[in-house]
Image: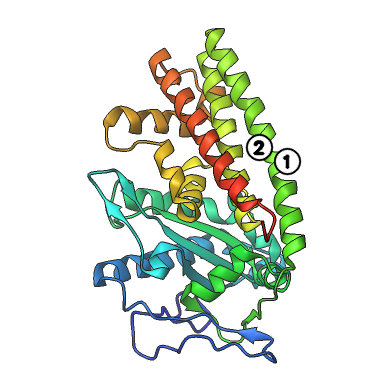
Amino acid sequence: MTIDGSHDWRVSGFKPGHRPLAKFSPDSRMIDVRTELDHLPASKQRELAHVVRVLFEEFAEAIILSTQPWKKKGRILKVVLYGSYARGGWVDDPVGGYQSDYDILVVVSDDRLTDVVDYWSAADDRLMRDMTINHALSAPVNFIVHSLKDVNKQLEQGRPFFIDIVEQGIALYEAEGFPFASPQKLPPAKAQAEAEKHFDRWFPSAETFLQNALDDVERKRPAEAAFLFHQATERLYHCVLLVLTLYSPKSHKLNFLRSHCEEIAPSLIAAWPRDDKFSRRCFELLRLAYVNARYSEHYKISEEELNWIGERVAELQALVKTVCEERLVPPGQ
C-alpha cells in the first residue's frame, strides 16, 4: 500500500537512488529538484519523513468522503523542503531562543485543493502538536500549498520565491511525471516596478495600523490595541516578503510570516528578543491577538506588555523600511 493509498511514492533521502542536481539548458522546458538529504543529521531526516507522512495521512482524511470527481482524484504531487534546512544553514539556538523552521512546499493536482481550512488545517494542527506536545519534531513546520499549475505559472513568470525553491529545494516526495517548468527570467524593470508597488501599498497600511494601535493604548483599550499591533506586524511582514520576493503566503500567522521574513532578511531578527520569558510571552500574546483579542473574553494583556509590543513593532517598522529601501534602490545606482 502506498502512502496515499494509490500512487507510487518515494521519500527522498531515506533510501538509496538519489537523482543528481537538475541540469539547466537553453532548450529545457521542464526540470526536477534535487533529492539529497545527506547534509542533515539522521534525526532530522526521520523528522522530515514524519512530516511527509502526516501531510499524506491528513490530506487523505480530508478527501476520503469526497463525491466530486476532481476531489476524489486529488493528489499530492510533490513535497519540497526549502529554506535553511535545504541549503544547510539552519540555526538551532535554545539559549538565544532562535530556531529555524522546516519550510515545506506541498504541490497538489488541483487549485481547489489548496484551501487551508478544508484540506490542511488538520495537518497544521497535528504538526503543531508534534512539536509542542508530543515532541516528535524538534523544529516547527511551516508549509504552503500550491497547485502544480500555479507553481509552473510562477516559474514561467520569473517569480524569485519559486525559482529559489526549485533551484535550492530538496524533493522529499515526488510523483512521477509531473516536473516543474523551467524558470524564466523576470525583466529587472518589471521586478522593480512590482516591488515598488507592493511597498507603496503595504508599508503605509502598516504605519496606519501601528498608529491606531498606539492610540488605543492611550485610550485604555488593550484588546483593540493588541489586535491592531498584530495587523501592523502582519502587514510589515507581508511588505518585506512582497518587496524582496514578489510573493507572500496568504496567512495571518505571525510565527509563520516572521520565520519566512527572517530567513531572507536576518536583520529583522533583532526586532523580537527571544532570550527571556517576558519577551516570548509578549510575542505569543501578539500572535494570539488576531483571534482572541477580538472574540475571547479570557484574553488579557497588561499595559507593560502592550507598551513593550508597541516598542518592538516600531523597531520592526524601522528595520523593514531599511530592508525594503535597500532593495528598492534602482539598478545601477
Q: Residue at x 39, y 55 (%)?
A: 101
Q: Amino acid at mark 2?
A: Phe
Q: Amino acid at mark 1?
A: Asp
Q: Which residue is most to the front?
A: 333
Residue 155, placed above or below residue 197: below
Q: Residue at x 72, y 48 (%)?
A: 196
Q: Are marks 2 and 1 in contact (CB under 8 Å)?
A: yes
Q: Is residue 248 visible?
A: no
Task: Using residue 257 as the reference point, say whether residue 328 is left or right of it.
Answer: right
Residue 184, placed above or below residue 101: below
Q: Which residue is mark 2?
A: 203
Instruction: Residue 111: give x, y in percent of width and height.
Output: 70, 63
Residue neighbourhood size for the residue with mark 1, other residues' Cα within 10 Å, grouped as few (<14), some (14–19), many (≥20): few
Closest to the observer, 21 or 224: 21
**Colour pattern of the rendering:** rainbow
Instruction: Residue 202: give x, y in percent of width and height.
Output: 68, 39
Residue 113, placed above or below residue 109: above
In the structure shown, which secondary structural element does the residue marked by tag 1 occupy? Answer: helix
Q: Which residue is mark 1?
A: 200
In the structure shown, which secondary structural element does the residue marked by tag 2 occupy? Answer: helix
Residue 29, placed above or below residue 41: below
Q: Which residue is most to the top?
A: 219
Label 2 – label 1 distance at C-alpha: 6 Å
